[in-house]
Amino acid sequence: MAFFSGEEGSVKFINGTGSVAAITATTAWTLDTSKETLDVTAHGDTFRKNIGGLISGSGTIDFLYTAASGDETANLLADVLTAADPADAQFELFLDTSSSKKVSFNGIVTGTSLSAATGDLETVSVSFITSGTITNAV
């Protein structure tokens, strides 16, 4: 049985058209998915019945600030400033270094948090929500 460690994960991103590119110095990412449930219990039933409904996702990407210009890091940071965002940003979250185990989706960057503290590295946290299909290839 194979296990994967956190340092094997990575993130790729592109806003709009083109090919996804790596976000440098990624330290962590999370993706939380949830499914709504619909109550379909009929009058007279003794037990409640539910069926699955709409699926949604949200998460964060954490990375060290490097001021890199040759990748999509700057675009990821700037995407939160797009007011009428068409949800055309493409995300790929990888669980391994071979890039074979990933979750991909379109989404909207909903927030950024930049942190600078004396004696520490500058960090960035970006939050997002998914839009449309979430493809799970893990």
Image (cartoon, grey):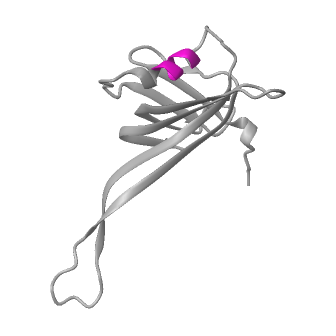
Instruction: Find the residue positioned furthest to the top.
Output: 69
Relative placement, left or right, of 124 versus 58 is right
- In which image quadrant can residue 129 be found? top left
Instruction: Find the residue positioned furthest to the left.
Output: 43
Relative placement, left or right, of 74 versus 41 is right
Magenta stretch: helix, strand or loop mostly: helix
Where residue 112 sits in the image (x, y, percent)? 53, 30
Please report the residue visible at 41 percent of the width from the left and 25 percent of the height from the top.
89
In the picture, the quarter occupied by the N terminus is bottom right
Q: Which residues are magenta?
A: 73-78
Please report the residue visible at 46 percent of the width from the left and 51 percent of the height from the top.
33
Instruction: Find the residue positioned furthest to the right.
Output: 119
The relative height of residue 91 versus residue 1 in the rendered view (above or below) is above
Where residue 86 sits in the image (x, y, percent)? 30, 25
Where residue 2 sits in the image (x, y, percent)? 73, 50
Asked whether residue 20 appears in the rendered view, the answer is no
Asked whether residue 113 appears in the rendered view, the answer is yes
The relative height of residue 25 versus residue 41 in the rendered view (above or below) is above
Please report the residue visible at 43 percent of the width from the left and 13 percent of the height from the top.
18
Relative placement, left or right, of 123 versus 37 is right
Instruction: Find the residue positioned furthest to the front.
Output: 118
In the picture, the quarter occupied by the C terminus is top right
In this rendered view, identify the residue nearer to me: 110 or 51.
110
Relative placement, left or right, of 110 versus 52 is right
Where residue 23 sits in the image (x, y, percent)? 61, 23
- In which image quadrant can residue 110 be found? top left
In this rendered view, identify the residue nearer to me: 17 or 76.
76
Residue 2 shown in magenta? no
